Amino acid sequence: MASHTSKAFLSLGRINVSALGLQKPVSRVAYATALTTTENKGLPDRTGRGPFVRKPRRDPGKPRTEKMAVDQDWTAVYPAATPFRPGSVPLPVRMGYPVKGGVPPEKKGNLELIKIPNFLHLTPAAIKKHCEAMKPFCTEWPAALDTDAKCDKHFPIKIESSDYVSAGPSVRNPSARIVDLKVKLSSLNLSEPARKKMLKLVGERYCKNTDVLTIKTDSCPLRQQNHDYAMYLLTVLYHESWKTEAWEAEKTVADMEEYSWEDSPSQRNILDMLTRMRVAVEGEGEEVREQMLGRTEVQEYKDSVTRLKNEGESESTMLQYKEAVKKVLNL
Amino acid sequence: MAAPMALRRDLCSLARILSGISHLGPRALGACSAHRTCNPIRSHVPVTSFHTATVFSSIAVSEEPDSLFQKVSLLVKGHDRAVLDSYEFFATTAAKELGVTINKVYEPSKDTERLTLLKSVHIFKKHRVQYEMRTHYRCIELSHLTGCTAQVYLEYVQRNLPEGVAMEVTKTAMEKVPDHIHEPMWKDHPVDDKPSQ
């Protein structure tokens, strides 16, 4: 029914165009909007005398945009997030894919403009008004904590957590309970053996380059609980690393974190070699070994070997080792 | 419009209230370590309200110290880049108005999820149809926010999140080393050698 009447309108349109005397009959197929359907709907009400007498449909009248002043308060027109109303927005907006040889459709009856979220309620003037109202609830950042270094000095523990906002059947997001505690070990009061024990206890969670211990907790269902658990873990780690157990005295060379040259096979080897080289010159004895230990080339060799073992193999460490060996063996 | 009237009405009580909170003011504003919520009771301050003429009731000040956020990072995800552009303008303008320092605003590269499905309900394996879903991102990094400001800003920005856009907020709070970690408790009372498990 409706299509029949709309076709009638289209045919009317074509007749008018040809009557105006245009060269080629341009068939402008328009988008089907709500306004192309006719007023009278259905046979029963045509007479107006039947059992269902409907009120005659009123004329919509001029849109509000024509009565709007240029300097009106826009925040009163769009105070909250509302769908697009073509009669309330005095802008000649066009949206949609243009018909062939045409322009995007106008805003009247345009579904594309209604579908997309609009920010008409968040103009800069509206934002300023909202912020003015919210200002009393905000607090100032303490002026003394302007650099990161000062923040780290006074507040070394950093707690990271996330919040998630999305549309869905539920507001909650289980990933919001995860808490990340980051602290620099240099800011904790730890002695050398306590620090070594702490590193052994913590293992993978410590980053050597940045000296940051990260404790990630997600075992509890609530964020507050995870936060308390992370603080508890930090406390326990701290106190346990200060404790010294009886079996820790059995620490072997394999357990050591860093390589130390004293009493190592490298020291014995180099001293044996040097002793054998000088056997003809001086007699053997303990004082000879100590004298050799005191020599600068041996010290350099010691530094290069320590560096090689601790830092791993790289261009500079290998070069340094090579130079030290050449000097010690007088090559 | 309501402002001058409120001013005249409350000017007489201004002096009385100010003298009452004068002891609170310098202590709250000066200290950096005791980071208290430094809002004095503001029932006398004329507040601009845009639609109704209600004056805000006195803002309650609690004694517990305000939390400090070194970094707050907002990541918004959406299917439409234009919507995220507008939202970014809104969020950055709101941050500037509230006096929040904006560190960085950048656009991570978009993610595209593509799937290939059969075009027909039954047979015709050679004829398929392909769909793709594009997720655009926008990241706004803010720094140096107090707990109160973060709450206000985040609530404002989240209430005005457009439909079809999701947000992920990562906050880095700063805390002091708690008192029980300053000194190990074994220092004063040395622990005997217990057989440890």
Image: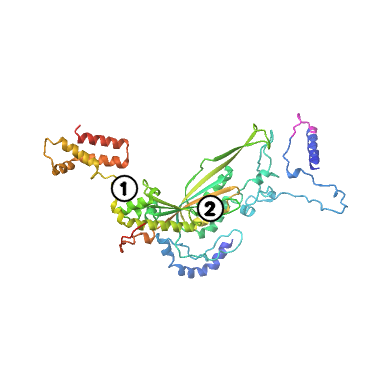
Give the answer, above or below, for where B191 lies relative to A1: below
Please tell me which residue lies in front, A263 or A32.
Answer: A263
Q: Is residue A275 left or right of residue A71?
A: left
Q: Is residue A133 left or right of residue A1?
A: left
Give the answer, above or below, for where A135 lies relative to B90: below
Tell me where residue A302 appears, x and y as whole percent. Answer: 23, 41
| Mark 1: secondary structure | helix
Give the answer, above or below, for where A134 lies relative to B88: below
Q: Residue at x 54, y 57 (%)?
A: A132
- The type of residue carrying mark 2 is Pro
| Mark 2: secondary structure | helix
Give the answer, above or below, for where A59 lies relative to B9: above
Whether residue A263 can be seen here:
yes
Q: Which mark is residue B76?
A: none
Magenta region: A18-27
Q: Which mark is residue A255?
A: 1
Number of residues whose C-alpha sits closer than 10 Å to that of mark 2, classed few (under 14), some (14–19) or many (20 or more)? few
Number of residues whose C-alpha sits closer than 10 Å to that of mark 1, classed few (under 14), some (14–19) or many (20 or more)? few
Quarter the C terminus of chain A occupies: top left
Q: Mark 2 or 1 closer to N-term?
A: 2
Query: Residue beneath label 2, please?
Result: A174
Quarter the N terminus of chain A occupies: top right
Magenta part, dominant SS: loop
The chain ID associated with circle 2 is A
Please tell me which residue lies in front, A87 or B179.
Answer: B179
- The type of residue carrying mark 1 is Asp
Tell me where residue B54 appears, x and y as whole percent. Answer: 59, 64
Tell me where residue A102 appears, x and y as whole percent. Answer: 69, 35
Q: Is residue A193 left or right of residue A271?
A: right
